[in-house]
Amino acid sequence: MDNYIDIHSHILYGIDDGSKTLEESIEIIKQHIEMGFTDIVVTPHYIENSKYKTNNEEKERILKELKNKTKDLNINLYLGNEVFINENLEQLLKEKEISSINNSKYLLIELPMAEMPKNVNNIIYELKIKGIIPIIAHPERYSFVQKDPSIVKSWIEDGAILQSNYGSIVGVYGNNAKKAIKKLLKANVISILATDIHFPNNKIYQNMDKSKKRIAKIIGEEKLKDLMINNPKKIIENKEVSINY
């Protein structure tokens, strides 16, 4: 299996807690290629009322430079964001402050780690009826999902899809995240896997084969292909991702 697609990465250098320099970004891309990735969506954090709120014009400028410096490599790069959940998402899209994934209807959203927002279901539902599909980033890392993994089903019913991190299954984010991703995979509620990479020589690179084997043991090779290739490809191409759980 190859031609993997990564829809969650922090390699747009100098604007969030990910890659700090152009050189770091290029090194991450080279390491991704070695792992079998051919497509990467850059998804810098966007958090209102913080220093992480670079608008699309600046993001596109940096991405253009990164594409230019990696044009001889076998990689396709696309613009996106990992947006901290708030009630202004549709407006931020219209104002070109934030970017959906490759200008598709899919928007990568992050929740608080420790406490679930009371309005999360309303936000998901409102986005869905306006034609925006929220992708909830790494649910297994949220303490409230770790305590009760079944809560994610209401998010899916309201219109969201879920993206887990490869590193979670091998304990990169702790034992609670490891237990949670196993439960979520067994429940068949995860639609996409991604790296959430922030810097070169990350543990994900050392554990990629182990991660794939452990996930395949739970969901099977065909389903793993959906999560690594088929569903991410549909997202980039703005096609429907079917959810069956």
Image (cartoon, rainbow, N blue to C red):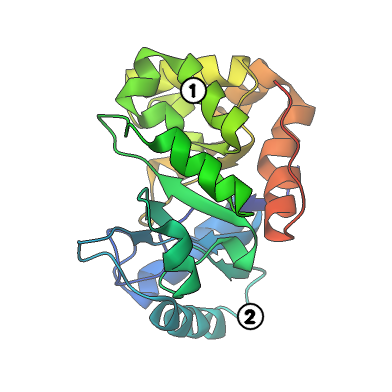
Check disc 2 and report its element: helix, strand or loop.
Answer: loop
Above or below residue 227? Residue 75 is: below
Q: Is residue 12 left or right of residue 187?
A: left
Residue type highlighted by circle 1: Ile
User: Hey, which quadrant is residue 189 in on the image?
Assistant: top right
* Front residue (pair 158, 215): 158
Q: Is residue 114 left or right of residue 10?
A: left
Write down the residue under mark 2. Answer: 72
- Whether residue 138 is visible here, answered yes or no, is no
The residue carrying pointer 2 sits among few (fewer than 14), some (14 to 19) or many (20 or more) residues within 10 Å by Cα, namely: few
Q: Which residue is pictured at 62% across the width and 73% down the height?
A: 73
Q: Quadrant of the C terminus?
A: top right
Write down the residue under mark 1. Answer: 181
Name the spot of residue 204 as percent of width and height, x first.
45, 41
Residue contact between numbered discs 1 and 2, judged by CB atoms under 8 Å: no
Find the residue positioned furthest to the left: 50
Above or below residue 134? Residue 16 is: below
Name the spot of residue 78 as percent of width and height, x first.
59, 68
Name the spot of residue 195 as percent of width and height, x first.
49, 46
Q: Earlier in the sequence, mark 1 or mark 2?
A: 2
Residue type highlighted by circle 2: Asp
The residue carrying pointer 1 sits among few (fewer than 14), some (14 to 19) or many (20 or more) residues within 10 Å by Cα, namely: many
Above or below residue 187? Residue 19 is: below
Labelled disc at residue 68: none
* Front residue (pair 141, 169): 141
* Front residue (pair 101, 201): 101
Q: CA distance from mark 1 to mark 2?
A: 36 Å
Q: Is residue 241 left or right of residue 202?
A: right
Q: Which residue is pictured at 71% across the width and 44% down the height?
A: 231
